[in-house]
Amino acid sequence: MLIIYTVECASFVAGSIARKMDDNDVEVIGFTGCTDNEYAIKMLVSFCRHPNVGAVLVIGLGCEYVQAERLAHIAAKSGRLADWFLIQDTEGTKASIAKGLSIAREMYRKLKQQKTVPMHFSDLMIGAECGGSDYTSGVAGNMVVGGLFDALVEAGGTAIFEEILETIGLKQVLVDRAASEDVAKQIAWTYDKAVDYCKEVHQYSISPGNFAGGLSTIEEKSMGAVVKSGTTRIEGVLKVSETPAHGGLWLMDSTPDPYWMQFGISNPSDNEGLTALASNGCQLLFYITGRGNVIGNAVAPLIKITGNSETFKKLHKDIDFNAGKILDENCTRSEAVAELAGLVCRVAGGELTRAEETGHKEFYIPYKHQNKPFCRK
Amino acid sequence: MKKMNTAFQINKKDNVAVAVHGIQEGEVKVVCESSHYNITAIGNIPKGHKIAVQDICAGEHIVKYGVDIGVATKDISAGQWVHLHCMKSFCDERSSHLDVMTGAPSDIAYL
């Protein structure tokens, strides 16, 4: 169940309702800006129809651009339980929290009556993002995820990888994997845009921790990052909030399009990329880290994987899977892939991830522009 | 017992290998796919960093994963540590002035 606020002014009421519900299946997301932004609205719409979401309560203040009623209508039309109200039409904070709580409890009761149905491995859509990368990312963590993605694609499932900013230096490597000439052009356009972005902001997607961990250049980090996509062909490039047309491996473009001669900010933190992957419809997310992270995601369960056994030892209550065992020479890559597949099936079946256990529910919905068609030269 | 120095060369075409456990000066076993060979480390190599497995001249490309990941900024001998002090990115213009151990940028003043 998702409680959505349409502007920062409504976030306190939305958050209060969720806190009072105090349930792992009730999450809050929202857009902070009182600004008209198609990108953010598309993201909110994608979550109203997300496969992990069964009920939506949208709470607005009443004077903002994002329309609570229209979001609730989209969720209802898709067969989900949905409701909405505006705080300005209710008698302030306390009355709004009481009203929201009563709606949420009734929705939750109905939602719990839904029967579960069996799903296959091939029904899964999984997104992968890495963060806090070190030397183990390219040789362990992302290697294991790449192996799992190959198996998922072969089974007929859908895999999405992102971080085009972490493919710098690898244009040809990606273009050579395109499923068609048209897809090759999409990849080339997306790549060139990412390079222009980095040049413009004088910032490549590599941080002091990456260097200290043994990575010397963005090209080296990129190659380690691209390994997580496995080896299958790339079916196409997805924009944020776009659902893939069919199974297979897809590349997601999260770089803003240039707008009024400016790009804006691309990846302020990994939470943005993960939220963007969830907006593509992923039911599950992978986060591959070398140096460690503790985050989760509000919409899709996040399985955290490290290739660094020391990081796993330190953060074993936060990290779900240690791919570092393939470096410690007591486990082959295919054994680790099989073990990860087992974990994926258990999480898809309802087993809590470390992030869920610890109460992490991060998300990030930014103001951004991404509405340019792929340039087809 | 002293642990044997080991480095992993990911692709046969690579001219660097990864010091997965950190390397002490001296003999190193370089593992590449199913075979291995020995080189001599010149100085210690920090954990996770790269060691040159052959002589690399200034201007030559550094190859890892079978892909060019940067360019040598000075001559590098087989067995030497390869990092920010002797290589740079093809595109990232800030890549070679960072602190060699912490990676922290030195071109922004904290005033």
Image: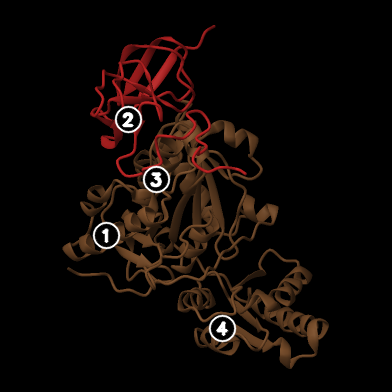
Q: Is disc 2 placed on a helix, strand or loop?
A: loop
* Along the line of sight, the residue nearer the viewer: A158 or A373: A373
- Residue carrying label 1: A187
**Chain shown in red:** B
Q: Chain of mark 2?
A: B
Q: Quadrant of the C terminus of chain B?
A: top right
Q: Residue at x 59, y 74 (%)?
A: A31
- Mark on residue B10? 2
Identify the amino acid type marked 3.
Ala
Real-space Cα separation, disc 4 to disc 1, in angstroms: 32 Å
Identify the amino acid type marked 4.
Val
Identify the amino acid type marked 2.
Ile
Identify the amino acid type marked 1.
Ile
Q: What shade does chain A have?
A: brown
Q: Disc 4 or 3, which lies upstream in sequence?
A: 4
- Residue carrying label 3: A225
Q: Is disc 1 placed on a helix, strand or loop?
A: helix
